[in-house]
Amino acid sequence: MNEKELSLSDMHYLISIYRLKQYSGYVRVTDVARDLHVAKPSVTRAVRKLSECGFVEKDCFGMLCLTVYGFKAVGRISEKETVVKTLLDRISGAGYKCSDEELLRIACAVSDQTFNIIKTAQTI
């Protein structure tokens, strides 16, 4: 699986692991479950899948961390969210508030080709 094949759910898990690691310095399955309001077995399945695909690692103590590929995926989706948010602000005015969930959905749905067109158009 490559970054383009990640589902919205996969991205939720990667972003949660990233944020929790930044906040507390460590991440466990229970932390992700609490953060995303899902059951621990759901996190375990997602982590197994993301680990098999090279996006997440789990150490011998059960701590989770992103691999280089995981960081790249989170960075790419964050860039897309920022560009989409900037575009929406420009179109609708500063008063429009798009939820984080909606931004993530849009960013995940936008192809790289479309994203590059939007990004290029913003610099004009």
Image: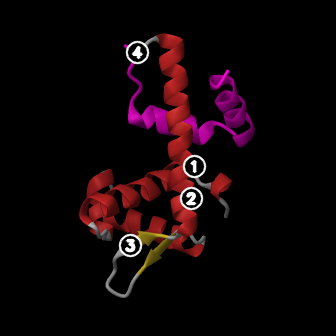
Question: Splitting the image into 4 quarters, where does residue 34 fall?
Answer: bottom left
Circle 3 residue: 64
- Is residue 82 something that shows in the picture? yes
Helix, strand or loop at mark 1: helix
Which residue does the numbered mark 4 point to in the structure image?
A: 94
Q: Is residue 32 above or below residue 28?
A: above
Per the image, the residue denoted by label 2 is 72
Mainly helix, strand or loop, the magenta region? Answer: helix
Marks 3 and 1 sit apart, C-alpha to C-alpha, by 20 Å
Q: Amino acid at mark 2?
A: Lys
**Range of magenta residues:** 95-124
Residue 111 as seen in the image, left or right of residue 87: right
The amino acid type found where label 3 is placed reads Leu
Amino acid identity at mark 4: Ala
Q: Earlier in the sequence, mark 1 or mark 4?
A: 1
- In the picture as drawn, the residue positioned furthest to the front comes out as 124
Of residues 100 and 29, which is closer to you in this image? Answer: 100
Per the image, the residue denoted by label 1 is 76
